[in-house]
Amino acid sequence: MRDLNSIKWLKAGFAITATITLVAFTLAGAFPSEFTSALVKSIIFFYLGVVVLRAVFFFTGSFLQRIDVLRLNRLSLKNFRRPMVSVIMPCYNEEDVIEASLRNLTQLTYPNLEIIVVNDGSSDRTSYLAHAEALHSPRTPVKVLDQRNQGKASALNHGLLHAQGEIIMCVDADSRMNPDAVEMGVRQFQDHRVGAVAGFVEIVNQRSVLLLLQQMEYLVGLNFTRRAMSFLGVVPIVPGPAGLFRRKALMQAGGFISGKNIFAEDAELSMRLLTKGWKIQTEDQMVARTEAPETHRDLLRQRYRWNRGTYQALLLNFFSLLESGWRGRWIAFHLLLESVITPVLNFGLILYFLTYFFTTGNLEMFTMWYFYLLGIDLLTTVMAVHNQGRMPMWIALTFVNKIYYFYMLLTWRLLSLYEEWLGVDMTWDKLNREGSVLKESLHA
Amino acid sequence: MHSFNWEYITAMFFALAFVFVILMTVGFYVNYKRDQWQRKTIKQFNPVNGRFFKRFIPGGLKGKYARYLEGQN
């Protein structure tokens, strides 16, 4: 990490460039001339080129990763070392789901396992229920630690202090793992350069269009890209609900950190691991099923935290990533592209098309741009759906995604970026868990 | 003869959809910020500040509302 001053300048630089770009696009649309439309056309081609290259990279990467997985599957037929794994589950006011998720963890088939529940100063019965459940776990030892409310990162570090395993697994209290998740993930640590393994996340409560769209985003936007990045060992974010870490790597990176300027401790830690030269891979057989926010309000609250958190983590580690070798440079470029350049360019182009339409009544360029993007999106979805062996019905959702969900999140990302640039105070808005799906599975 | 310009209508539909989605998101944003602001500035209901409890408070009520009456006699 650099000193805060250079980070401040970096932030200001991004903010000013983005604002100038947006204003320039609007003005170019409002006062059209041959020069500006030629300029915008070249920017559109640049943008489309980037999108195509990205799709090609994801396709090749995920294809090669699958071959890699086949190799691993052959390897796993032989006996591989099964070091002790400590599962750390931080929880705060999770009385609705804690029993179900603890029971799920005790049913994991991995032979050498311990579970550590860290109660982060809950004001409800979480601690009581966890203690009660711990008594009924015959096979796997369960420790319950209580602390006053200090945040998720602090709870994870507290768990880490008491963990004895060589591998640390971090899970969320509202997610459920498949029984052989740990075994599948631990295989990847046979490569001594691997510092962390990211699991896959799926949504349990797929019962409205908004939730289906989120599941599609997880399929195409997160899991598919994660596979491609995994081939190079540069998975940018080890997700909170399912992540395995080598204890040595965690200690070398300095554990989890949190504070006023870090709201995505998982992204921040992953980037710090990459700066230390560790590889981060993904394991598609380690799946965490989790509840997604059901209303627009909750979804946007969650995304606000993700957007600002990832961006904060990127800013903090930007220079160290650039200095840490090709992996770090790759990930810095990728995250900059995903979280700043693409949203600003995309939104700027929309502003351009709208103002251009109001002055000239012409929508030709807009149509071309839109359908080209839609085409690429469709192709990517087809690849992702094929790659992960899903039903083709997900492809149909691309149209809804492209007209509504994608642009909602894009606008939201830009708004949260501006808040970050203006330094607006933020708080950790905990989601209201319905807990219904997890409960249903508990009583089933 | 007049005929529908399907290209234009489709493009217009998407453009309007964009405007709608963006305005909707901005609306969510305003709502979110207002909610956060309200949470920050919310004041607890205090019967002592009401119309009838300015000066004279009978003994029974004084006990009942003792927790609101700090600093007053």
Image (cartoon, helix red, strand yellow):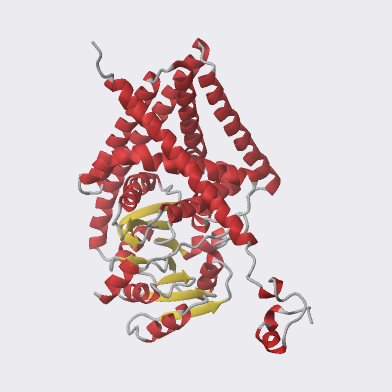
* A330 horizontally vs A190: left or right: right
Q: In the rendered image, is residue B40 in sight?
A: yes
User: Depth check: A180 or A379 in front?
Assistant: A379
The image quarter containing residue A254 is bottom right
Q: Position of residue A286 (x, y in %)?
A: 32, 60
The image quarter containing residue A10 is top right
Q: Position of residue A253 (x, y in %)?
A: 55, 58
Seen in the picture, residue A141 relative to B29 is either above or below; the reply is: below
Q: Residue at position x 44%, y 44% from top?
A: A409
Q: Position of residue A420 (x, y in %)?
A: 60, 46
Seen in the picture, residue A414 relative to B52 is either above or below; the reply is: above
* A56 horizontally vs A7: left or right: left
Q: Residue at position x 25%, y 45% from top?
A: A394
Q: In the rendered image, is residue A321 in sight?
A: no
User: Depth check: A192 or A112 in front?
Assistant: A112
User: Depth check: A209 or A221 in front?
Assistant: A209
> How many marks are shown on the rendered structure?
0
Quadrant location of the C terminus of chain A in the rendered image: bottom left
Q: Residue at position x 43%, y 47% from top?
A: A234
Q: Residue at position x 66%, y 73% from top?
A: B46
Q: Position of residue A112 (x, y in %)?
A: 35, 75
The image quarter containing residue B69 is bottom right
Seen in the picture, residue A98 relative to A338 is either above or below; the reply is: below
